Image (cartoon, helix red, strand yellow):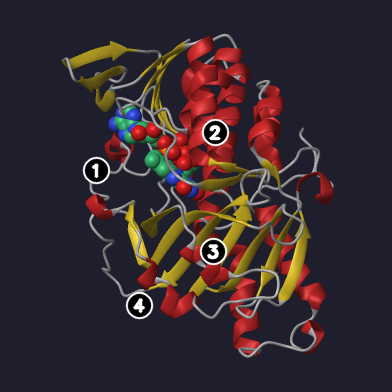
């Protein structure tokens, strides 16, 4: 088939590589004129790493990521609540990677450009007559027909708008995120991801590179803070303000005293090389992703609040599911229905679970039971209950220890 993908992010590029590997003729059109390694850290769960491994990318990923050994949940006093072994240490067939989002995107971009057609400066703005993409370029508008058009164009997707014209702005429930990177001494084993605090003020932190010669490691961190109550009709800050530079003064009143014996949170914040401010948003799940010979993938299909390392992971899983569905069914409509049946309920479930804090809900429970900390966790909550809750989220979000 001749497939056109709108959007050269992690989802669109992985889909392009997976579809090309199945013998399709693929073109990726990316709106940005000069793609740059934007963003900070993300985590790729083992099932997504398995997909990228099948595309031959595992050695490259290993060279540019940290193999996450565990996810540690802690209270705001730095006391560990639960340690969840991850990747190979958690018995999965593949590692979990903590990686720079922009560097991963650029790597996928280079791979895709070597194998198929990837064109920047091409914004897909709509579709005419079912299968003709309407494209804006600096040279003026143009059109391109395809057997299948895939909208992998992110949370502000133009192709999603065809399915939900009245949807409006993304949903915001009053939490802002400040995302930064800082060079700092490694903490714990130098490969651990930590979520500390609770839903009103949370600090997520993990390294995204090997220590350099001076012993410092590039540490990615995300500080979440509730700035508004989640009232009906609350609207996110204007899109023009997304990704604006964050201010240290907005964080230190909340996180300034979070000095643990294993991590100096205010120290990390004040060392930030780069800090961006973003509203934590998602969208309501759609009742369908397909319209004629078009479908959606990644954030265009299911933007979700960033809990459980699902953003890039689910986009990669979509890519594989779409390629599989097209291989298993000759009829395009049947294939798109099969793709959607596999992916849409799962992603809608994650959107809903993440709105309830997902696997981080345990942090709120411990905060409510022991706001001043604890001498022994077992005095506050049964550790087996904590493990069961976290494992239930992982199962519902599609974690699996082996690739099929
Ligand atoms: C600039 C940027 C920085 C990010 N930084 C982080 C981060 O630090 N941490 C994190 O967890 N997540 C980040 N994300 C989100 C994360 O990358 C996604 O949640 C996840 O990887 C799913 O990716 P996606 O490919 O579905 O969507 P996206 O990553 O949003 O990619 C969509 C792509 O489509 C392009 N595009 C948009 N509209 C059109 C159009 N009409 N026609 C053609 N192309 C279009 C965009 O330029 C982009 O390259 C970032 C996203 C972007 C775009």
What residue did someone put label 4 on? Answer: 229
Rendering coords of residue 224 (x, y %): 46, 67
What residue did someone put label 3 on? Answer: 268
Earlier in the chain: of badge 4 and badge 1, it is 1
Considering the numbered disc 2 on the image, is that residue within a helix, a strand or a loop? helix
Q: Nearer the viewer, mark 1 or mark 3?
A: 3
Q: CA distance from mark 4 to mark 1?
A: 28 Å
**Local crowd size for mark 1, using a 10 Å CA cut-off: few (<14), some (14–19), many (≥20):** few
The verdict on label 3 being within 8 Å of ligand 1 is no
Q: CA distance from mark 1 to mark 2?
A: 32 Å
Q: Quadrant of the C terminus?
A: top right
Considering the numbered disc 1 on the image, is that residue within a helix, a strand or a loop? loop
Earlier in the chain: of badge 4 and badge 3, it is 4
What residue did someone put label 1 on? Answer: 165
What residue did someone put label 2 on? Answer: 104
The residue at the point 46 percent across, 28 percent down is 12
* Ligand number 1: quarter of image: top left
Farthest residue toward the left? 140
Q: In this rendering, would 154 be left or right of 96?
A: left
Earlier in the chain: of badge 1 and badge 3, it is 1
Earlier in the chain: of badge 3 and badge 2, it is 2
Q: Which residue is nearer to you in this view: 113 or 310?
A: 113
Q: CA distance from mark 3 to mark 2?
A: 24 Å
Q: Nearer the viewer, mark 4 or mark 2?
A: 2
Q: Quadrant of residue 164?
A: top left
Rendering coords of residue 402 (x, y %): 80, 38
Against 191, residue 126 (above or below) is above
């Amino acid at each position: 088939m001749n497939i056109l993908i709108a959007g050269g992010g992690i989802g669109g590029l992985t889909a392009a590589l997976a579809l090309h590997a199945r013998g399709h003729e693929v073109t990726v059109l990316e709106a940005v004129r000069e793609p740059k390694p934007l963003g900070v850290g993300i985590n790729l769960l083992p099932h997504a790493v398995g997909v990228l491994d099948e595309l031959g990318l595992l050695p490259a990923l290993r060279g540019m990521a940290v193999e996450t050994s565990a996810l540690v949940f802690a209270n705001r006093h730095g006391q560990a609540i639960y340690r969840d072994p991850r990747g190979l240490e958690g018995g999965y067939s593949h590692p979990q990677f903590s990686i720079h989002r922009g560097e991963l995107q650029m790597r996928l971009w280079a791979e895709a450009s070597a194998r198929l057609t990837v064109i920047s400066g091409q914004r897909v703005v709509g579709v005419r007559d079912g299968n003709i993409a309407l494209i804006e370029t600096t040279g003026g508008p143009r059109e391109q027909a395809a057997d299948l058009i895939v909208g992998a164009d992110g949370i502000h997707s133009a192709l999603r708008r065809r399915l939900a014209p009245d949807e409006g702005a993304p949903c915001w429930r009053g939490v802002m995120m400040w995302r930064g990177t800082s060079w700092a001494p490694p903490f714990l084993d130098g490969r651990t991801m930590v979520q500390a605090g609770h839903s009103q003020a949370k600090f997520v932190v993990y390294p995204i590179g090997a220590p350099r010669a001076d012993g410092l490691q590039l540490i990615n961190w995300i500080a979440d803070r509730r700035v508004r109550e989640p009232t009906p009709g609350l609207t996110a800050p204007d899109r023009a303000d997304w990704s604006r530079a964050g201010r240290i003064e907005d964080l230190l009143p909340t996180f300034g005293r979070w000095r643990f014996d294993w991590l100096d949170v205010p120290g990390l914040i004040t060392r930030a090389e780069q800090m961006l401010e973003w509203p934590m948003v998602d969208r309501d799940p759609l009742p369908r992703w397909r319209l004629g010979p078009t479908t959606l993938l990644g954030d265009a299909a299911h933007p979700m609040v960033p809990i459980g390392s699902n953003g890039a992971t689910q986009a990669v899983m979509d890519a594989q599911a779409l390629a599989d569905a097209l291989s298993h069914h000759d009829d395009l409509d049947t294939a798109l229905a099969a793709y959607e049946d596999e992916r849409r309920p799962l992603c809608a479930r994650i959107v809903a679970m993440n709105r309830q804090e997902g696997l981080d809900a345990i942090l709120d429970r411990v905060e409510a039971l022991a706001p001043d900390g604890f001498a022994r966790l077992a005095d506050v909550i049964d550790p087996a209950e904590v493990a069961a809750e976290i494992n239930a989220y992982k199962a519902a979000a599609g974690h699996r220890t082996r690739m099929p």
